Image (cartoon, rainbow, N blue to C red):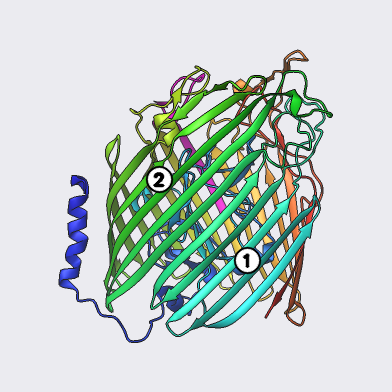
Amino acid sequence: MRKGAIFPFAFVMGIFLFFPITFPAEQNNSEENYLSLFYPKSQIVSGATKRVENVKTAPATVRVFTKEEIKDLGVETLSDLLNLLSSAIVTPQTNSRDSLWIRGTRNRYNDKILLLVDSVPISDPIYSHSPIDEYLTLENVERVEIIFGPSSALYGSNAFAGTINVITKKPEEGSSFHISGKGGNYNTKGAFAEYNYKNGDFGIYAYFSYFDTDGDGLDRQRHFLPQTLKWNPKKRIAGGITFEYKEWILRVSRIHYYHTFYTDWDIPTWRWQDEGYFYNDTFTSLEKQFKLNPKTTISFKTYYADYDLRNYWREFIWGRQTPNSSPNDVDYSIDVFKNGIKVGSELQFNYTPSEKANTIAGISFDRIKTGRVEDLWQKVSNGAITRPFFINPESLNNYAGYFQQSYKPTDRLTLLGGVRIDHLDLYGYKTTPRISVVYTPVNKTVFKCLYGEAFRQPSMREYFTVDLTGSFPAGNKNLNPEKIRTLEVSGSYFCDKGGDFSIILFSEWTYDEIYSENNQPYDNYSGHRIRGLEAKYHYTSEKAEMNFGYSRNWCNLYNIPPYIIKGEGIFSFTDKIKLSLFGGYVAQRPRDPKDLFYYDPSRKPYKRENVPGYFLLNTTLSIYPFWKNFELSASIYNLFNKDYFYPTYEPTKYYDLKAPNRTFLVRIGYRF
């Protein structure tokens, strides 16, 4: 063990000497089950401080979606869910993956957000990209928590602009079986099955998910010629099983996922079936909470993730891509293997001597290890192989210790302070603090003042890439982690009749941003200051639940909309029938100066306008149950069939990405 981890390890292990471990004869209700007796599940959050608490008074800005809301809103992916937030925008990229821009922080590889699924960080081991598209299913999800702002004081690297905490389903008392199917236009189809059994100390939950779509691709390809095949095929087969025994929880899951490069050159039909991104990933985790006494618990978690990723595509001979193109018109075939594993463990101590104080301390270890990554280009005419860049097998270790103390000097005031110390390979020690004050002057009003810092460790791509051609950014082992500091002030008022209103002001400073200028090696550059305002209104009653949000950014960053307005509502007409509506407007975005002129070899360069704003409306009608134990729902997305576009990250090479046209999806299920 490295020297930096000795003190926190000794601190936590010493706890065992002072608190005798007792195993209760009967399984106790978890803290979450206890709090759910007093608060709706949409008001419970566990990711803000690593303990379950009420969203209203948690020291963070949080939005929680329960499985019921996810189902009623008709959302299919995390991207759909995140697009409901007024302070976030999801932008598809030219490689057919979605990126989340949150509070003005741009995020090409989703490496400035931390995606946790049952405490396991989900991101590919090379680029640190966190998938929020069809890669993950939401059908086995119990709750999704979106925590805005930095959380590195608890979670370490990548908890930069926000943290997405996904909690999946666990065994529940009794037995049940549920199957469902869905279908829509663009040959979209899917199926889902789940089984639940629990009796006393033993429980099991298992699921299987299948999804396949031709997708709604682009009307035009790279040089604005008509796209031969207006498809964006995606396919997912996933399954998992969760065992529970005396509060030991073991989870095993497997994901096979495929998608294309849907903005590559003109795509003949013979290409999409074996060309694109291929994922075969396996995840295993084990956790247990030990109750030492009524005031003290210790939690243990460990995980293993195996990533088997491959990219394969073919490059046409210049000028010979036509609707009748064939494999004989291919110049190069490009094959890239990106395999790796991620392992980690964490031991956490939670001590609550009274209602006025709580102490959380822990230690953790994480390791990323990759195999050799080679970008192999094979000349079809003679079989010659070149390697534009490669990454040798590498590993990165991180040892960390963290401490967090909350204290309530009065019933209306809560103070919290915390700090985490990470020891990162190639960098050394990194300290990230957080401080918060939550004040409730009267029962209906809550004020929060939050300060936090976060960092993002450079990815394997940024650290270790060896470039052989001079046309790809090379790695740099001397990179510093990217840093952010955030100050946030908010006030909330809660009405008597189920409504609440919040105003949030925040200011962010980023430092040591990592990117490449003109294909030079990756380096650290100066950062930005981002200031913004968010206004939110929430209303709930027996017949309706509504959320409205407005966000405003005062920053000079390109491709960031100055304001966004969004809102959604779920309306219950009877005990069986629900209608949901989601509407949003994203303002016009200024274009990057490098993207002002579009280059087309067949035409003269011409100036491009700013990215126009757009309005979007989705709706879902649900009937639970429809007949006996049957459930039925139908969704229409982009109801008014509006055209709207997203800017790309490759200026001058691509036209803006056109968003999907009107689509629909019908689901039917049966519960045994």
Residue 120 coordinates in the image, percent (x, y): 44, 56
> Which residue occupies the extreme top position in the image?
604
Confirm whether residue 38 shows in the render: no
Confirm whether residue 282 shows in the render: yes
Q: Is residue 516 magenta?
A: yes
Nearest the eye: 544 or 7: 7
Q: Residues within 10 Å of mark 1 (few under 14, many from 20)?
A: some
Residue 640 coordinates in the image, percent (x, y): 82, 49
Q: Nearer the viewer, mark 1 or mark 2?
A: 1
Q: Is residue 74 magenta?
A: no
Q: CA distance from mark 1 to mark 2?
A: 31 Å
Q: Secondary structure at mark 1?
A: helix
Which residue is the site of mark 1?
69
The residue that appears at 71% across and 69% down in the rendered structure is 180
Nearest the eye: 54 or 156: 156
Which residue is the site of mark 2?
487
* Residue type at numbered disc 2: Leu
**554 on left or right of 426:** right
**314 on left or right of 495:** right
Read off the magenta span: 512-535
Tell me the quadrant of the picture where the C terminus can be found. Answer: bottom right
Nearest the eye: 493 or 478: 478
N-terminal label among 1 and 2? 1
* Residue type at numbered disc 1: Glu
Residue 647 coordinates in the image, percent (x, y): 65, 33
The residue that appears at 59% across and 71% down in the rendered structure is 498
The residue that appears at 28% across and 48% down in the rendered structure is 399
